[in-house]
Image (cartoon, rainbow, N blue to C red):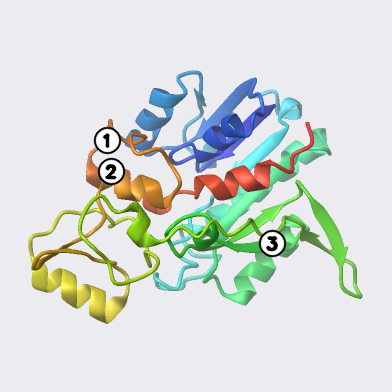
Amino acid sequence: MIVLSLFNGMNTGRQALENVGIKVDKYYSSEIKPYAIELTQYHFPDTIQLGDVTKWREWDIDWKSIDLVLSGSPCQDLSAAGKRAGINGSRSSLFFTFVEILEHIKSLNSNVLFLQENVGSAAKLDVGIMSRSLGVYPVRINSSLVTAQLRDRYYWSNIRTKEDGMFGDVITDIPQPKDKGIMFKDIITDGYVDTDKHTCLNTKSGEESKNQEYLKHRNETTGMITLIKKDDLVRTVNKIEMCRLQGFPDNYCDILSTKKAGSLLGDGWTLPIIEHIFSFIKC
């Protein structure tokens, strides 16, 4: 396949394709975060970096040759953890750039496949706008089925679809993956936990803090941090644990600091979920 990955992040799409045995002939990546590019090139040095997605009309690509378009457009304006500016917010509105690119490719190759992901806490109005823009309604999958974290996400794709309801709406027909029964206690490197699942892997996960009262207060009042206990101390997840929460090998982010790894993993896709979706691609 020839793949175009927008908002490529830590390159989960490429890794998932490799893991399910789909040969990648050429992989284009649009990403601007330096350490995301660094990690991508470390694992897949043949990746072709394109730069800023808003400058897509300047890219030197044989557009009609693209077989698969991937997009994890920014979720900050859609997430319940953000300020809820919505799909037209300054960051999440980049979704429409993805739509422009997809429509351009479709005009040259009507068989192009796509996958778009965004947060499960997005407002129904925004989900509806995105679905009508793409011509397909999403499937909702929680990463808790295949990892030790709660990560509720919508996935829009034409990899496998069906018509549904009296109006024949096209929906993403990806079945739920089998529950692997992985618990938070199963993936920690030391200490113990009181919760079955890690509650929120985000861009601040894994940041070191010696302020025990701050960590406890944030855990109790926001639910945006899950603590690991050891003796009388608490901590957040370390780099290995963050990789495990997203389904990656322990050493996948070794070349990055914990803070940078947390930023990429917190914004990224859950690898086993993407593998599951790609397993329905007919090559």
Q: Residue at x 20, y 59 (%)?
A: 191
Question: How many angstroms separate mark 1 from mark 2 (CA)?
Answer: 6 Å
Q: Residue at x 51, y 45 (%)?
A: 271
**Disc 2 residue type (three-letter):** Lys
Determine whether 259 is above or below 93 in the image: above
The residue drawn where x is 50% and y is 43% is 7
Q: Nearer the viewer, residue 119 or 131?
A: 119
Please count the marks in the image. Answer: 3
Quadrant housing residue 231 = bottom left
Residue 70 position in % (x across, y down): 61, 42
The reply to whether dot 1 and dot 2 touch (C-beta < 8 Å) is yes
Residue 171 position within the rendered picture, expressed as x and y whole percent measured from the top left: 78, 61
Q: Which residue is mark 3?
A: 138
Would residue 159 be seen by someone viewing this image from the given angle? yes
Q: 91 and 45: which one is in front?
A: 45
Res. 71 in view: no
> Which is more toward the observer, 196 or 11?
196
**Residue of label 2:** 260
Say which residue label 1 marks.
256
Describe the element under mark 3 as helix, strand or loop: loop
Lower position in the chain sequence, tag 2 or tag 3 = 3
N-terminal of the pair, mark 3 or mark 1, is 3
- Separation of marks 2 and 3 at Cα, in angstroms: 30 Å
What is the CA distance from the residue labelled 3 to the residue labelled 1? 33 Å
- The residue located at (46%, 68%) in the rendering is 79
